Image (spheres, coloured by chain):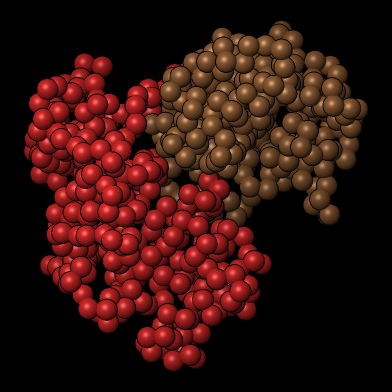
Chain colours: A brown, B red
Amino acid sequence: MPDTVLEVTALQRTFGTVRAVDEVSFALAQGGSLGIVGESGSGKTTTARIIVGLDRPDAGKVLLHGRDRTERARGRAQRLARARQIQMVFQDPYLSLDPRTSVQAALRETLRLHFPDIDHARRIAELLDQVGLGSWAADALPRRLSGGQRQRVAIARALAVEPAVMVLDEAVAALDVSVQAQVLNLLADIREQTGIGYLFITHDLGVVRCVTDDVVVMRHGRIVESGATAEVLAAPRHPYTRLLLDSVPRPGWDPRQIAAARRAL
Amino acid sequence: MTRTLDIKSLRLRLPDTARPVLDGVDLHIAAGETVALVGESGSGKTLTSRTVLRLLPKGAETEGEVDVAGENVLAMTPQQLHALRTGRVAMIFQDPRAAINPLRRVGDFLTEGVRLTGTLSEQDATRRAGELLEAVGLSGAVLRHYPGQMSGGMLQRVMIAAALMGDPVLLLADEPTTALDVTSQAEVVALIGELKERFGTGLLFVTHDLGLAAAISDRVYVMYAGRIVETGPAEALFADPRHPYTRALLDASPRLIEPGRRLAAIDGQPPDLRQELTGCPFAPRCRFATGLCTTQAPQPQAAPGAPGHLAACHHSDRLAEGAADA
């Protein structure tokens, strides 16, 4: 049994009368990959935001290597140390990069903040290489890059601090199929090389099948099913998981039946 | 019989581009037929669908013909065009929130078109709007709602109801489900299918999702760099693709069934618009490409024994052999 890198216990978050996250618990193994699947309003993004530290839970804990990170950070050093533990890559590569900052400058800013004493130029070259971008990309502004290339830059920036866990919130959803495949393969390679752990927030079951070992299915803020990805997708136990699976379009697909099943649930 | 939509050798040029954005597009839809137009961003699929309503970017120059029920849209007078847009052809956009005025009630939005053209009186328009809302599974009470009070799935239903107000012969749906959850996607697709049957309209479904295209359409067109690279019956095209790009797209899609960890990504990127093209636009990314592909643009050719299944590739037969070997 590999060690647990990230553990979430009984997370709760309420917005007004809505329980956005309700008693959510799961664990991510060292170097593992866990998918959180659900539709809009399922609480998957709120869960991710709490884990990263962009939001705080009303109750429950987020433990990294057994240490709680939900308490308010004391001072700059602790804030930075927490940022080095977990990094996030967002859905829209067009919004997550500053349009006036070159790729190189964006990476340097992160490196300067976290590792003021290392050779930045060499590390930037290393990072660009790691995400499959040539040195030509260093001076480029985001608008010169395609969606897939921008997402690679966002990944490089997340990797720059050598995090233990990377949270990917619909990180390939906006990419075209051919480019999406490149980025998913890249992520698989990086995990193999570095032993980083992934938390994949997505609504796409095909992507989950491809890149995760375990999966958690969320609905209305609660976990309705969890387990090894291959097993959950091959033999779903919860009717909602089955509905999600049936909703994936394929030849001979009957959307009317799904619509009926959805109303019945 | 006249085709509902018949696009013939459509070529569209934009200022500051080295090559036509649409380059010899041929596409047709028979009455009541569902046709999917599949492609990645920048392939020209959205532009093709917008050309049907002559919603063109500034400075666009067109060649060829776009016939709706036998009349060429590209040669219409402003009055004819107005009638076309408010009546015979309707469009459903990807993001209903961007397409519906948030300050007006749903009822206003639905009846605006027919009231402006004087097709229906205000009373009749409101009655029809109520009926259509029920047909899309919403109650007539929604007429008094503001868009902000409704979810994305509900608003997309309003979009669909609005599209049917003018009794169109042709529906253009541009990624109508991309912004929706998978389960709402199924509902919206089921709904479009039902209404299409009931009202007998043709449907052009523009999407990047091959699985969805296969699931819902009679025929499929695959677009790459402004050209139709392959077309045919949905089943044949997905079971036995004859263009390497179609094959590659299928291989790159994450599947639910096979556990294959590594996806077959397509290396490289689609050609830039500032770049002139000679030969086949897919050649630089294609594993079947030969010298011929870089010098001579392939013309669409029918598969043996299947005149409706066309691929613009010099090496379709090698592709079929390769699949048989594997």
Residue, x 76% and y 31% (percent of image)? A51
Residue A188 visible from this viewpoint: no
Depth order, front residue of A148/B325:
A148
Residue A9 visible from this viewpoint: yes
Left or right, residue A254 beside residue B84: right
Quadrant location of residue A72? top right
Left or right, residue B50 beside residue B175: left
Left or right, residue A13 beside residue B55: right
Depth order, front residue of B275/B2:
B275
Residue, x 18% and y 54% (percent of image)? B11
Depth order, front residue of A119/B71:
A119
| Position of residue B35 measured from the top left corner of the image (x, y, whole percent) | 28, 53
Depth order, front residue of A87/B118:
A87
In this rendering, is residue A29 above or below B285? above
| Position of residue A181 measured from the top left corner of the image (x, y, whole percent) | 43, 27
In this rendering, is residue B230 above or below A158? below
Quadrant location of residue B2? bottom left
Tell me the quadrant of the picture where the N terminus of chain B can be found: bottom left
Left or right, residue A94 beside residue B150: left
| Position of residue A166 measured from the top left corner of the image (x, y, whole percent) | 65, 24
